């Protein structure tokens, strides 16, 4: 390669990765921005239903984004779309989802809008990492791949900040700002690199993978890590972070934003240690720290410190390592089927965990956090027994 072209190639890769990761930012915003609508919508719904029904329906619409993610993940694995076109499409879907909220605030309208946003989010998580890998020079691939998880945490922080505008007169402002960001993202995507990429159909079907006896431990592990990523409590804590802090001590809104900012910093630095320390010790430590934090929530011990501890623990390993493991515990020809299994289970777990446990959080309070603590203790034990370190090893069955 002409050395004079190398800086131009790297500049193009950085720009393309950054603009692709704007979709990751929009996904993160979509996880937390619902807080701006909650007071107004809840008040409106209470005119025709009791508080228990309002809480149950709000849990459903909050988690419905993950059903959309599941649907688009399956479609993306079947259709294998052009990546630049898919990134543009997902921004159009984000626009459609957010516009839906302006027409009506009924359960059906918000449910539909969240599902459409989920379709966009699923495309984001299916396409952005692969796209970034394809357009990245080998010498900076690791850095550019970190843009996706970093973008999600930045988006979560922005969503928490925008959710502070949650009165009857201001709840539309965060949605308008998000639509503006989507517009900027769409314009930026027009100039990104369009890699020619046509993945060959996998030689191994999902059914054949599951039936393969040599793959059984790997199949068990990929199911374990993707389900456990949500059994740590991250979905409830992320979406309803401000509800964890007593309002008479400090501002829950400001505290939620500051803790989200801390997650950005932790995510930015955590990736550099994965290859130094190894996947196994990091994910075990990560799960134990997250479990310790939810134990603190259970007993009401320093909720701010518990939230910071959870953010540190989760972003240390649970946030990203399940995705590394999925690619590293299967031979390459099994990767497509393994990815479909793992990511689909991930979205199903996100939806069912939040939809089932949100009403329990409302009814029983902090004791529900003990469930997450128990799950993380079991997960750490199972990983210690069954998972073999994959650092610097060729992808293969466990």
Image: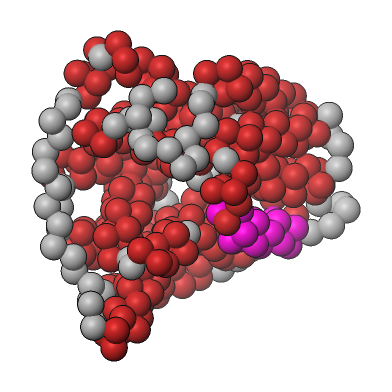
Q: Magenta: predominant secondary structure element? A: helix
Q: Is residue 397 left or right of residue 80?
A: right
Which residue sits at x=54%, y=44%?
319
Q: Decide if residue 222 is on the left or right side of residue 379.
A: left
Q: Quadrant of residue 215?
A: top left
Query: Left of 182 or right of it: where is 221?
Result: right
The part of the image, by quadrant, that contains residue 293 is top right
Viewer-proximal residue among 293 and 239:
293
Residue 54: x and y, percent? Answer: 54, 36
Residue range of the region highlighted in magenta in the rendering: 254-271
Instruction: Examine the structure image and report whether residue 164 is included in the region drawn in magenta.
Output: no
Quarter of the image with the N terminus in it: bottom left
Residue 203 visible in the displayed image: yes
Q: Nearer the viewer, residue 317 or 264?
A: 317
Task: Decide: is 87 above or below 202.
Answer: below
* Residue 167 seen by the camera: no
Residue 17 falls in image quadrant: bottom left
Q: Which residue is at 57% across, 56% downward?
A: 272
**x and y, in percent, of residue 347 in the image:** 39, 35
Horizontal side, residue 245 vs residue 215: left or right: right
User: Does residue 101 lie above or below 140 as drawn?
Assistant: above
In the rendering, at what x and y percent does residue 183 appear? 33, 74
The quarter of the rendered structure image containing the C terminus is top left
Question: Residue visible at 39% across and 62% down?
Answer: 141
Tell me where residue 264 appears, x and y as whole percent. Answer: 61, 60
Residue 256 falls inside the magenta stretch: yes
């Amino acid at each position: 390669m002409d050395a004079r072209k190398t800086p131009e190639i790297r500049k193009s890769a950085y720009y393309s990765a950054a603009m692709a990761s704007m979709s990751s930012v929009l996904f993160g915003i979509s996880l937390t921005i619902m807080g701006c609508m909650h007071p107004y919508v809840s008040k409106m719904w209470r005119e025709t239903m009791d508080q228990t029904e309002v809480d149950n329906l709000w849990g459903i619409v909050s988690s419905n984004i993950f059903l959309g993610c599941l649907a688009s993940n399956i479609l993306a694995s079947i259709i294998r779309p052009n990546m630049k076109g898919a990134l543009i499409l997902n921004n159009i879907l984000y626009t459609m989802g957010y516009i839906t909220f302006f027409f009506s605030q009924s359960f059906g309208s918000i449910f539909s809008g969240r599902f459409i946003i989920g379709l966009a989010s699923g495309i984001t998580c299916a396409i952005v990492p692969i796209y970034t890998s394809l357009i990245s020079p080998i010498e900076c691939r690791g850095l550019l791949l970190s843009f996706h998880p970093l973008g999600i945490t930045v988006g979560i922080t922005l969503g928490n900040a925008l959710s502070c505008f949650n009165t009857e007169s201001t709840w539309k402002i965060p949605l308008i700002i998000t639509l503006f960001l989507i517009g900027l993202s769409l314009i930026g995507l027009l100039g990104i690199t369009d890699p020619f990429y046509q993945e060959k159909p996998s030689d191994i079907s999902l059914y054949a993978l599951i039936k393969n006896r040599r793959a059984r431990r790997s199949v068990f592990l990929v199911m374990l890590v993707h389900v456990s990523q949500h059994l740590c409590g991250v979905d409830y804590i992320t979406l309803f972070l401000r509800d964890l802090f007593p309002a008479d001590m400090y501002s829950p809104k400001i505290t939620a934003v500051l803790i989200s900012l801390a997650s950005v910093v932790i995510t930015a630095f955590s990736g550099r240690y994965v290859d130094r320390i190894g996947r196994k010790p990091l994910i075990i430590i990560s799960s134990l720290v997250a479990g310790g934090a939810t134990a603190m929530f259970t007993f009401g011990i320093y909720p701010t410190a518990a939230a910071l501890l959870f953010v540190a623990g989760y972003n240390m390993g649970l946030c990203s390592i399940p995705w590394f493991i999925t690619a590293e515990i299967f031979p390459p020809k099994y990767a497509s089927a393994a990815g479909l299994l793992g990511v689909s289970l991930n979205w199903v777990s996100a939806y069912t965990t939040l939809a089932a446990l949100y009403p329990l959080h409302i009814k029983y309070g902090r004791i529900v956090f003990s469930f997450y603590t128990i799950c993380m203790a079991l997960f750490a034990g199972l990983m210690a027994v069954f998972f073999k370190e994959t650092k610097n090893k060729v992808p293969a069955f466990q």
